[in-house]
Image: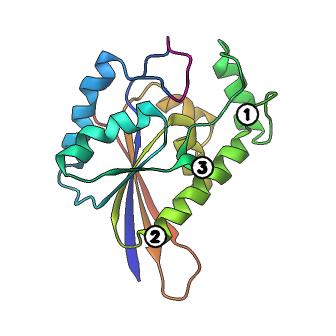
Amino acid sequence: MSTTTVYFVRHAEADNSVADDRNRPLTEKGRADCALVTEYLRDKNIEIVLSSPYRRAADTISDFARSVNIPIETVEDFREFKLCEVWLDDFMAISERQWADFTYRLPDGECLRDVQVRNVAALSDALKRYEGKNIVIGTHGTALAVTINYFDSSFGFDDFMAMVYTRPWIVRMEFISSAGASGASCAGIEKISLY
């Protein structure tokens, strides 16, 4: 039996004036807050650093990765969800509807079930490849929220709303693998405030 510990790092404050989701940078405050992430992770014996391919997620953990001389491995399926092709001002109303129905999607967008399946599959792959290691994953609000929901179905829209403006944010998950078992089971979830 082995334990794999995953630290999901929800990215720091991003510059929402940049509509390009993949290349949206952190704000000045977001860049400064990356030091909180580095400080928290410093003594966690991290061995692997993974990230969404989106700039804000990788940038949030890059200071830490440099400080321990571990390269960041980009995993495409850890990316944030695609709501639709255009920028929407009423994100919260649409988000509430999506949390009520995980299959609801806008044209050209993903539903929360798609995002959950994609992110959990990427996590399962990481747990197999890096079994027994301490892992950091740079991620996003919705991607992280639906991952938590997969392992704890009581985590819903109200919990998502409570963390929407908490950036950066860390969630520590423990996974146990048993010899001969297929996959790892989640043995605990801890939500960590850096403030």
Query: Which quadrant, please, contains the C terminus?
Result: top left
Q: Kindly identify which residue carries mark 3.
A: 149
Does label 1 or label 2 sit earlier along the sequence? 1
Whole-percent x, y for residue 180 in the image: 54, 88
Asked if the magenta segment contains residue 153, the reply would be: no
Q: Nearer the viewer, mark 3 or mark 2?
A: 2
Q: Kindly identify which residue carries mark 1.
A: 98
Q: Which element is circle 1 on? A: helix
How many other residues sit within 10 Å of disc 2, few (<14), some (14-19) or many (≥20)?
few
How many other residues sit within 10 Å of disc 3, few (<14), some (14-19) or many (≥20)?
some
Does label 3 or label 2 sit earlier along the sequence? 2
Q: Nearer the viewer, residue 177 or 187?
A: 177
Decide: is 123 above or below 28.
Answer: below
Q: Residue at x 59, y 33 (%)?
A: 158
Q: Which element is circle 2 on? A: helix
Tags 1 and 2 in contact by the CB under 8 Å rule?
no
- Give the main secondary structure, helix, strand or loop, of the magenta stretch: loop
Q: Which residues are magenta?
A: 17-22
Q: Which element is circle 3 on? A: helix
- Quarter of the image for residue 12 reads top left
Decide: is 136 above or below 162.
Answer: below
Q: Residue at x 41, y 23 (%)?
A: 25
Whole-percent x, y for residue 132 in the image: 36, 73
149 left or right of 126 in image: right
Q: Which residue type does callout 1 highlight? A: Gln
Q: Residue at x 27, y 32 (%)?
A: 34
- Quarter of the image for residue 183 reads bottom right
Total marks placed:
3
Q: Kindly identify which residue carries mark 2.
A: 129
Whole-percent x, y for residue 23 in the image: 48, 26
How many other residues sit within 10 Å of disc 1, few (<14), some (14-19) or many (≥20)?
some
Q: Which residue type does callout 2 highlight? A: Arg
